[in-house]
Image (cartoon, rainbow, N blue to C red):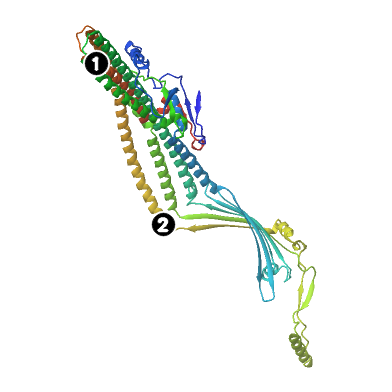
Amino acid sequence: MKLRSKKPIYSLALVCIGAAAGVSQVPQATVPETAAAKNVVAQLSEPAAVNFYQPTDLNRVGVQTAQPISLSLQDAIRRALENNNDIEVSRDDVRLQRTRITALEGVYDPVLTVSPTYSSSSTTFSTRTHDFRANAGVNKFIHDGGGTISSFFNNQRTESAFAQAQATAGSLNGGQSSGLYSSDLGVNYTQPLWRNFKIDSRRHSIYVARKNLEQTDQDFRLSANNTINSVQRAYWDYVYALRNQQNTVANVNLAKENLRQTEAKIEAGAAAPLERAEVATELANREGDLLLATQQVSVAENTLKQLVIRDPLSSEWADTFTPTDAPAFTMQPISLTDAIKDAMDNRFELRRLKLQQEINQADINYFKNQTKPQIDLNSSFSLNGLSSAGLNTGTTTTNLLTGAQDVFLLSSLNATRQALGLSTIPNPTLTTTAAPGYLFGGFNRSIANMFRGSAANWSVGVTISFPFRNRTAKANLAGAKIQEHQLDAQSRSQENAVIVEVRNAVQSVETARQRVTTAQRAREAAETQLEGERKLYENGKSTTFLLFQRENALTNARNAEIRAQTDYDKAVADLQRVTATAFRANNIQVNTPDDLK
């Protein structure tokens, strides 16, 4: 079956492939098919057969034992990956970092700008002009090459006499109009040729953000890996606590049976009344041990619940979890070489440092690029159109001297010239020719005029700039190189720490394996001693004190064996953690986000 995370984390998903309930989830961990091992499992899982007396109250505060919830190790891991609050925080960190990348990539989105403007201005005390502009444009940064492209479409109507004179001078010989319309359509493009060509601040920021996303992904995997380890350890601690409680219950029941037999002997006159006190004292001590064992069960169960229950007010806090997986171990030794190789290939801390080194290398490349001179190619192309609705439409002739004083002076001059027999001077005239027909109209005409053959304009140029010392870029580059050296040292230090952890973990697994076999032999010897002591006691050749010692020794041996077995499983879990193989060992797949593929 496939168990998926309840909450989407973009394309980062958890898939747990479960196993049948009751099967140990420890990789390559199988219980040896020996009589001793079978006896251990049976002894720890079957309820005590002796139950002549009312058992000690094992009820725990705030916990209902009527309908226990079966929980396998795989189910516990699945629930923790789905519900654990620390995992949820790490999952949201990945989602948050993804939004930051999207925000940085938004700088390459085209930007449309529209700016209609109406203005009224006074040129003289009696003249006022009214102008209207409607400008629009689209600007966009180009990713490859770092160029910038901007297009524009500008439209303007002006009543300014100066602007009209500028537009009509020469070609219209001073023709006047009531309003001038102009339209411009074009594009500007700037391309860096040296600095900012291969990398610029925008591309550098996006690259760093993507690497930060990969680091956040590794942090999530590390958190999930640690959570799996915590669940495994808590699960086996809970198993041990329950088995320890069962062993203690069995020991209490033995004491109660001894008390019953002692009471019968006292009534029959075969034992002294003082023997009752000895048995009662031992029973009270064992009941005290049972209370402590029950407390350990509560603590271990709460630790496990904290990992698998999401809501602090969930009703499951009042339920009893019953683990279905039994401790298991294998006699196959762990290869130290393979474990170190797995750790060096998979450890998330090493991957994170490698990503930090890649970020540092990007910083070096960027700051090195910023030390170069800036050479930008600038180009533009535009189409321009003009029109006016009030241009002169015919040819007119006007006298230049129209004032009374000017006409009087000209007449006086001509009278004098005539008296001297000279020719008269005519009044100078100005001839105004009509504007071409294609210039007559409003905005529609000015837009149409943009596409006439003479309307095209273009330019190409280069801008060169550089600071004389450029200390900022050089200092940033020097700092990035120092950080490169620091990261190299951190990587070596982290690798040494990883190797130490792996070596210790492998040794811990090997020690735990030997402890299991040793504890099995100790438990078998304790069973033999108790059986012999019981026969001596029944034949009157032993004392109650010695019998209790043998019973307590067997209980301790059983607890030591289950502790050794659970410690072995915890050691295997720790080895999975330090080698970062918990996902593989527990059939868990973490899908990589599409952004990182």
> Which residue is drawn at the image coordinates 37% and 50% (left, top)?
479
> Which residue is drawn at the image coordinates 25% and 9% (left, top)?
265
Quarter of the figure with residue 471: bottom left
Give the label, 2 or 1, closer to the camera.
1
Q: State which tag comes first along the sequence, 2 or 1.
A: 1
Where residue 52 appears, x then y in whole percent? 34, 13
Quarter of the figure with residue 55: top left
Of residues 229 and 288, the one drawn nearer to the viewer in this rendering? 288
Tell me, for residue 276, which label it has, or none. Answer: 1
Is 525 above or below relative to 567?
Answer: above
Where residue 189 appears, x then y in whole percent? 57, 53
Where residue 272 appears, x then y in whole percent? 20, 12
The type of residue carrying mark 2 is Asn
Tell me, for residue 169, which label it has, or none. Answer: none
> Which residue is drawn at the image coordinates 66% and 75% (left, top)?
124
Of residues 108 and 303, the one drawn nearer to the viewer in this rendering? 303
